Amino acid sequence: MCFLKKFLAERRRKKDHANCHNDTISTELNTATLSLDALFADPDHYIDASELDQWQYQWRYLSSADGIIRTARKMTAAEKNTLDRFEAFQQRLSELADEVNRHNDAYITARLENIKKMILPIEGKNLDAQQLACILKEGRNHQVVAGAGTGKTITVIGKIKFLLKAEKYKPAEILVLSFTNASATEMCQRINKETGENIAAMTFHKLGMNIITAVNGVKPNITQINLSTFVKETLNQLLKDPIYLRKFIQYLSFYRIREKSAFDFQDQTEYQDYLSVNQPVTLKNEVVKSYGEMEIANYLYQKGINYQYERPYQTDTATSEYARYVPDFYLPDADLYLEYFGIDRKGQVPDYFTAKANKTATQSYQQGMAWKRKIHAENNTTMLELYAYDHLDGKLIQVLEEKLLAAEVVFKPKSDAELWAEIKKSQGHFFENLGQLFETVISLVKINNQPFDQLYQLNRIHQGHQLRSNYRIIELIEPVFKAYQTQLEKNNEIDFNDMINLATKYVISGQYRHHYGYVIVDEYQDISRARYNLLKAMRNQSDFGLFCVGDDWQSIYGFAGSDINYILDFESYWGAAEASKIETTYRFSRSLIDVSGHFVMKNPKQIKKKLSAVAAGRSHPEGEFSLGLIEGHNERSMVTFMEATIMELPQKAVSFLLVVIIMILNCLTNRRLSASMIIVPVRLRSAIRPEPIYRWNFCRLIDPKVYRRTMFLF
């Protein structure tokens, strides 16, 4: 009897709990629905993405079925009603984005005629529907992706004119940020001419300068140190230190090339293309076939071991199946050969390696290895075998040294000073190239405000093929960076990168307080970590509307610190945002857009755009294409044909010309000219300058074809 009472009591308790929970869910559904309806209630209210994001966060509990308790027992009518309402609510959530778009589209449509009367024309021009929508949209965060030639600057001017005319912000509350003095000056002048107001339009560096000056009461001392010169002079001094010189020589010998394994590529073309850009060139200035061979050659050179690269074998071994045997290395003083076989530990090669009939690439390669071994056995010559897997494991030099010592090869090692003197004499560009690399890394470290300890840590985290190489170069650059920082402190100076970072520090500390209510960033695709940090610090201090205009397709300043992720992943940095596009270009033809767009969109990370063309003042006859090809059997005929074609372009039309010259080697020529340079004169015409302008394009000889080809865009 006692057990039955407990059972019934527990059953009542569970039922009461279920009813209470059902009542709670029902109440929350009512409240959430009412608050959502309120967002759409006013047709004169534009629903901001951040506003919707806040609502979704508040009612995230109702975003999944986990909030409803389903029991095995039969549901009551109240529970069934709540479940039905919950499912209807879920259905509405799944269609919420479309509902918001319909509401906001109606908001914009209702105001198009009014805004046209309010702000048009802008600089004597009308704006298209996408431009006007960008201006009308209201939001705390607004990202505008504008293709090349779509009129983004005139849209920015229109936005400012609207903000002023609608009295949403006062002139002093608007800040426009650009990336160059020229663009900032132009923007300022054009805004003033259109609106009659002086709007603050400046670079990020000028903003940083203003903040520092406001805090300190005086302008900071901007250094006059030429970083390029400073790096070279400091590097020359450091190379007098034997320890630093040793690290420097080791880097040149084994770590300066950005290596990838042959197994990392999908086909031979991809692999050869990579090698052509990241050529395996030895300290003796020999172009070898692989990075493993480069490492072997540099070690032999360091150790004073005389070698000959790809000298034909002492006996003509040509057969109907194989050409004459050409070993990788011959050591004449020791009379032995070195072969570097590109196999992994399983004895396999990449599938794209050459395969013979009825054999795989690995089988064909293994057969070739056996043939070489047979030749040495038959001719009583010595071959030392080395393998790609040792190179991948970082053990190639260790294995090579052990085999050379076992073969009693005589080592005559050169001192680091001797090596550097010889390298500098024969390949002075190494020093120039490294100086440029040091300068770039120092600038990036300062731009990103990262201590060197963090660089070492990042390198360890990312690992990868470049782990050792990155470590070596960071180790070499660090003392140069420290010397530069010491000199700045000694001179009581800052450089341009310090300007932004110091300004950020003053904003975070509260020493500077801004007064802006709306900030517009032009060319947003070029924003760097330091610039983002400054904007973020200002916004954390006092919120403002943010309007960012850019084009990820035009992001080309990664070497200067810009990070394309800030535009690709906009919301992860700024929160929920309006996303707009301006896709009608007034600069290019349809055919050129098709070619360039198809090429760019090969990268799946790029923002999808459907550009259309209204090439004002320019026409392309039916069937005419913007990509053409000129062929000639020699350089003279090629250039002659190219010049004649260019001269046929309209005299008054602005011609945007991209000339890509592919100058080719004559197959009959025995000379190696792959590093030679050809200078080709190109005549450009412009509506601004009607007189012909001659410019020089420098083109590298890259491919052994009998004829020459020139590709041009117009």
Image (cartoon, rainbow, N blue to C red):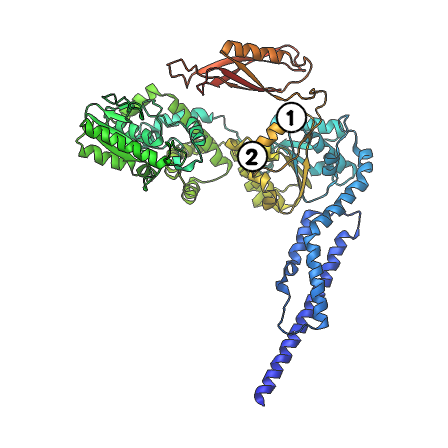
Report the front residue among 64 and 54: 64
- Residue 642 vs residue 469: left or right? right
- Residue marked by disc 1: 591
- Residue 503 vs residue 590: left or right? left
- Residue 630 vs residue 261: left or right? right
Looking at the rendered structure, the secondary structure element under dot 2 is loop
- How far apart marks 1 and 2 lie (CA) works out to 17 Å
Report the front residue among 198 and 697: 697
- Residue 432 vs residue 616: left or right? left
Q: Residues within 10 Å of mark 2 (few under 14, many from 20)?
A: few
Choose top left, top right, bottom left or bottom right for residue 651.
Answer: top right
Looking at the rendered structure, the secondary structure element under dot 1 is helix
Quarter in which the N terminus is drawn:
bottom right
The answer to whether residue 209 is visible is no
Q: Residue at x 37, y 14 (%)?
A: 670
Report the front residue among 110 and 390: 390
Q: Is residue 86 above or below residue 217?
A: below
Quarter in which the C terminus is drawn:
top right
Residue flagged by tag 2: what amino acid is it?
A: Lys
Q: Which mark is residue 602?
A: 2
Q: Which mark is residue 123?
A: none
Q: Position of residue 603 (x, y in %)?
A: 55, 36
Q: Residues within 10 Å of mark 1 (few under 14, many from 20)?
A: some
Choose top left, top right, bottom left or bottom right for residue 138.
Answer: top right
Residue flagged by tag 1: what amino acid is it?
A: Ser
Q: Residue at x 63, y 78 (%)?
A: 13
Q: Position of residue 92 (x, y in %)?
A: 71, 55
Q: Residue at x 63, y 62 (%)?
A: 65
Q: Is residue 612 above or below residue 30?
A: above
Q: Earlier in the sequence, mark 1 or mark 2?
A: 1
Q: Is residue 459 above or below residue 2?
A: above
